[in-house]
Amino acid sequence: MKYKAHKNHHPFTYFLFVCLFLNVSHFQAQNIPLNQEDLINHLNQELSGESPKRNLEFISRQHRMRGSEGYTKSINFIQYKLEEFKLEAIEMIKIPADGKTMYGTQKSRLAWDVTFAELWEIDAQTDILIEKIADWESIPLVVAQDSHSGDVSAFLVDIGSGQSEEDYINKDIKGKLVLTSSQPGSVVSLAIEKYGAVGILSYAQNQVTAWWKENENLIRWGHLSSFSETKTFGFMLSLKQARAFQQRLERGEVIKLHAKLEARQHEGYYDILTAVIEGSDAKLKNEEIAFTCHLDHPRPGANDNASGCVAILEVARTLKKLIDVGKLNRPKRTIRFIWSPEIEGTTALLNYKPEMAKKIKANIHMDMVGGNPNTKAIFHVSRSPQSLPNVVNDIGEAFGNFVNETSKAHASGEIVDFPLVSQEGGKEALGAVLGGFHMGSDFQVFTEGSFSIPAIYLHDWPDRYIHTNYDVPANIDPTKLKRSAFIGAASAYVLADFNEKDVKSLIEVMKQHILKRSAKLLDYCTELSKNEALNAKYYFWKNEGIAFQSIQGFSEIAEGSRESYRRFISNLKNAIGEGQALKIEHAKADVVYTRNHNVKGPMSVFGYNYFFDKFDSNKPTPAIYSYSGLKGSGGEYSYETLNLVNGKRSALDIRNELSAEFGPIPLDIVIEFLEALKSINILY
């Protein structure tokens, strides 16, 4: 199926929206979001950027892999701080991890520890040590995650990618160490199991950005499978080291190396720390606004994700202090703070503690929120997927826009009331990208259809040092930490204390945001065929209506406010059109699927993929995983497909909503994936 661009919009429509944009920008630059001047003033005065950076400096010294000594030191440090800040209901939740137990869609991974690892070049004849290549104590990232113990002396062979049989033609691999450009885990089946290599050296490049492969000295995070029956090891090299080896091998040199590791997997726990600021309203305090981050990461992992961990710790300190000294009232709903291993810990927690999942009304997630200009980071305040339209997104965006405007004015030399800068930090404008949807961290467990908890996701992307040994505290900006904490704290407090008096101002914010989203919609429609453009408009208005109704989850809506909103939407619909859902003839277009709620969580978790573990490996991989649309790829399409299954939508409904969100996708591809999910008993 081919889709042609549709460019029939009248030029006056674009002129109208340009005028609206200018008006909205001016309005928001001059006004306090949601009438929260007192809250903003108190947060601006109390929030620190320096304090969280000092906490980050401690955490980033620890190698924080799941169940490891470094992770334990870090989480104990945060617990000590929570006690110092007088947080309430502090609890360390220990969820057993034995490599077998399932928590929803997450198979628990064994804890992993390394006590020693070195890689040396040795003399080919005498085995005398010549030069140290890699050292665990200096840079833990040199050892691929889930490596096992080994002690070998062997010659080095370059296998290139190492993922196809052609890479091994005329190469003697047995008993050798192999050099590969691929992740260690992806070459085990051929290099180790079939051809008998004894270990892996990898210079795999991940996290592709404009700076990819530019810095030859970066050592990147490598992985072996957590569940493989084959016990082997991998060392990670920089591009500079790998290229030097390749040049020598091409000249015909013989390179012999000695690798020694002491590493093991063992039964352990997902240690998850939580604490609260308890709500004041007897009826509402069982509703919670939850802050999350992920604590686990190789050392140093400063931006990813010591930054998010210390930012929500700073929010906890600040809100608790402001409440204790009487500057802020205790909010009606409870605010919860959670530190856990990334995605797998969150999936385990929400399945292990279903009563906690039921209480959480909104999630504010921070993952990489402190990168200074040296990281080349772009900051995002992202929203939930379109399968979960909710007013929570507008609140996060409102405060993100406020920081954008006030920081831009301050950087430009204007006098502003709330510059939101730290004495030891930068003064650059934040320049946050607002309102998009991005995957890649714990929030996607909350927003997944099993739990359907709306989320605000604060994060840096790109970051040229992500998952490398250069992700260090020197690249963290205290001002950025303060601003991230501010957006999170303000959003959480408003949500936790929201009631009837806040509805009117929130609706005004929503109107401003809808104007912006409408303009983006019109621009998007120019890339679509006429029918697909009508489909995109139809689901745009449908989801905006659901988002408006979601206010009732926090407060009743007065009839006057409803009528004002209805008139606004009616006029806007008349200006750009209501749209119409696309009709496609197909034998299974009207089939309705239902989710199996006995298995909760996304298909792809961390270190484990539920779908591919359960799906018949003799069948072809569903085409959705390799599909690429205008605004999304296989990961987004497959994630949202499952989210949209609710026992009411037909296969065509799901296809149409996916197309409106990420770009047109053939119905056959969607049905193929739905049937594949049915084959593994995720759907009925």
Image (cartoon, rainbow, N blue to C red):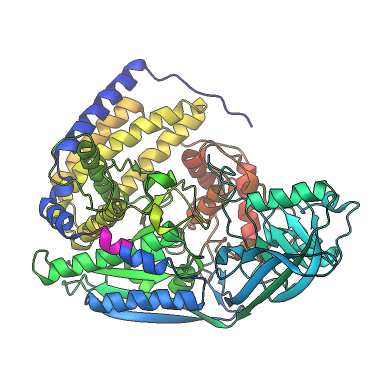
Observer-nearest of 666 and 383: 383
| Residues shaded magenta | 48-53
Identity of the residue furthest to the top in this view: 11
The chief SS type of the magenta part is helix
Reply above or below: 225 against 169: below
Identity of the residue furthest to the right in this view: 170
- Residue drawn where x is 21% and y is 59% of the image: 47
- Residue drawn where x is 36% and y is 70% of the image: 338
Quadrant the C terminus occupies: bottom right
- Residue drawn where x is 26% and y is 33% of the image: 570
Using the rendered image of the protein, determine whether residue 578 is visible from the camera's viewpoint.
no
Q: Is residue 679 left or right of residue 425?
A: right
Reply above or below: 538 against 9: below
Residue 142 coordinates in the image, percent (x, y): 61, 63
Q: Is residue 22 left or right of residue 66?
A: left
Using the rendered image of the protein, determine whether residue 556 is visible from the camera's viewpoint.
yes
Quadrant the N terminus occupies: top right
Reply above or below: 60 against 666: below
Observer-nearest of 61 and 647: 61
Residue 284 coordinates in the image, percent (x, y): 21, 70
Tell me where residue 562 sits by quadrant: top left
- Residue drawn where x is 20% and y is 45% of the image: 507
Residue 524: say if magenta: no
Reply above or below: 208 against 494: above
Observer-nearest of 662 and 188: 188
